[in-house]
Image (cartoon, grey):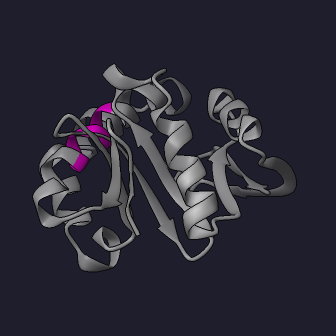
Amino acid sequence: MEQTSNRFLIRKASVEDISRIAEILVFVKRMNYRAIFRNDAVSFGEIQVIPVAEQYSKPEILDSIWVYEAEGIVKGLIRIVGKEVVELYVEHFFQGQGIGAKLIEFAKKEQDAKILWVLEKNTDAIRFYETHGFHLTENRIFEEGTPEYKVLMEL
């Protein structure tokens, strides 16, 4: 199902979107997570556009991604698996314009998403999700390969 208005479109991602998805993921992950993980080898070595594009081009991943497009530009994305929001990213230059809000509301209303995991130290994301009705639970797990925790949020 697509959600449209005069100014934007939320639609299933396609093969043509892969390079843009990879750009958004690499840049936003570096901006948001470098301060938390403090690992330049990962931020600038492992997280590279071509390997990310290859990973996200796999049908089992690409088929679970919806993109926010406006004026012919993919500005954000959300990955939903079952009832879980797995990822939500908005291009740094377009943050603060309500794109993330539209994506999370789309996930809740159109895809029946009810849960997500967020880094415990990512307080901005936690506040954002709380604004959209999610609440923290007592469930915590380690982010694989790091000393950091993720916490479960649910509606």
- The reply, left or right, for residue 147 in relation to residue 69 is right
Q: Of residues 13 and 146, which is closer to you in this image?
A: 13
**Part of the protein shown in magenta:** 21-27
Q: Is residue 62 above or below residue 28?
A: below
- The reply, left or right, for residue 135 in relation to residue 34 is right
The residue shown at (45%, 35%) is: 99
The residue shown at (38%, 44%) is: 5
Which residue is situated farthest in the front direction here? 6
The quadrant of the image that shows the C terminus is bottom right
Q: Which of the 4 image quarters holds residue 48?
A: top left
Q: Main secondary structure of the magenta part?
A: helix
Q: Of residues 38 and 50, which is closer to you in this image?
A: 50
Q: Which of the 4 image quarters holds residue 89?
A: top left
User: Where does the image place residue 141, in percent across and percent down from the top left?
Assistant: 72, 58
The residue shown at (83%, 47%) is: 135
The residue shown at (47%, 29%) is: 32
The quadrant of the image that shows the N terminus is bottom left
Residue 68 within the magenta-colored segment of the rendering: no
- The reply, left or right, for residue 57 in relation to residue 34 is left
Residue 96 visible at all: yes
Q: Which of the 4 image quarters holds residue 47?
A: top left
Residue 25 within the magenta-colored segment of the rendering: yes
User: Where does the image place residue 15, in percent across and percent down from the top left?
Assistant: 14, 65
Q: Is residue 17 above or below residue 94?
A: below
All told, the count of numbered labels is 0
Residue 40 visible at all: no
Q: Of residues 7 and 37, which is closer to you in this image?
A: 7
